[in-house]
Image (spheres, rainbow, N blue to C red):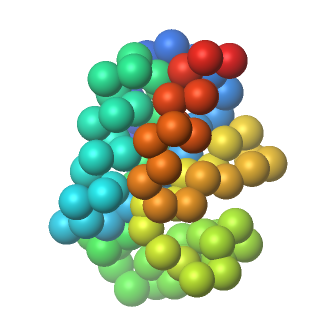
Amino acid sequence: MEFKHVAGENKGKITLYALSTCIWCKKAKKLLTNLGLEFSYIDVDQLDSQEETKVVQEITRWNPKCSFPTMVIDDNRCILGYDETKIRELAKK
């Protein structure tokens, strides 16, 4: 299982769990990129079933409904869905 890395300004560890077909996931990736933030992401629907099962277990630790996008920051907090205000706040810290 390989996360894709997007270079940018390091504002903490940002991990985005997404679906390749999800418009809100695409918006989250675009906003993070436009803000110039460093992040890693994985398109869960592109994984084989065994990898997908592992990733879904990880997501449900943060988001019991396992909805997308799910963004984990510094392994200690989470942004659920496309919340532009909260995502923009990441760039300000």
Residue 77 in the image, given as x and y percentages of width and height: 74, 50
Which residue is at a point 44% across and 41% down the rendered structure image?
84
Q: Taking 85 as reference, is 12 above or below it? A: above
Residue 85 visible: yes
Residue found farthest to the front: 85
Q: Is residue 73 above or below residue 54?
A: above
Which residue is at a point 72% across and 72% down the rendered structure image?
61
The answer to which quarter of the image holds residue 33 is top left
| Nearer-the-camera pick, 14 or 50 | 14
Q: Residue at x 47, y 61 (%)?
A: 81
Q: Left or right: where does residue 20 sit relative to residue 82?
A: left
- Tell me which corner region of the image, top left, top right, bottom left or bottom right, holds residue 42: bottom left
x and y percentages locating residue 69 in the rendered image? 44, 61
The quarter of the picture where the C terminus appears is top right
Image location (x, y in percent) of residue 17: 47, 59
Which residue is more in the foreground, 29 or 50? 29
Query: Can you give x and y, in whole percent of width and height, for residue 16 in the image?
Result: 48, 50
Q: Is residue 75 left or right of residue 32?
A: right
- Where's the N terminus, which quadrant? bottom left
Q: How many marks?
A: 0
Query: To which quarter of the image does residue 4 belong?
Result: top left
**Left or right: 27, with 86 as reference point:** left
Given residues 58 and 73, the one toward you in this image is: 73
Is residue 43 visible in the rendered structure shown here? no
Q: Residue at x 36, y 45 (%)?
A: 28
Instruction: Please say if 84 is above or below 36.
Output: below
Q: Is residue 54 above or below residue 70?
A: below
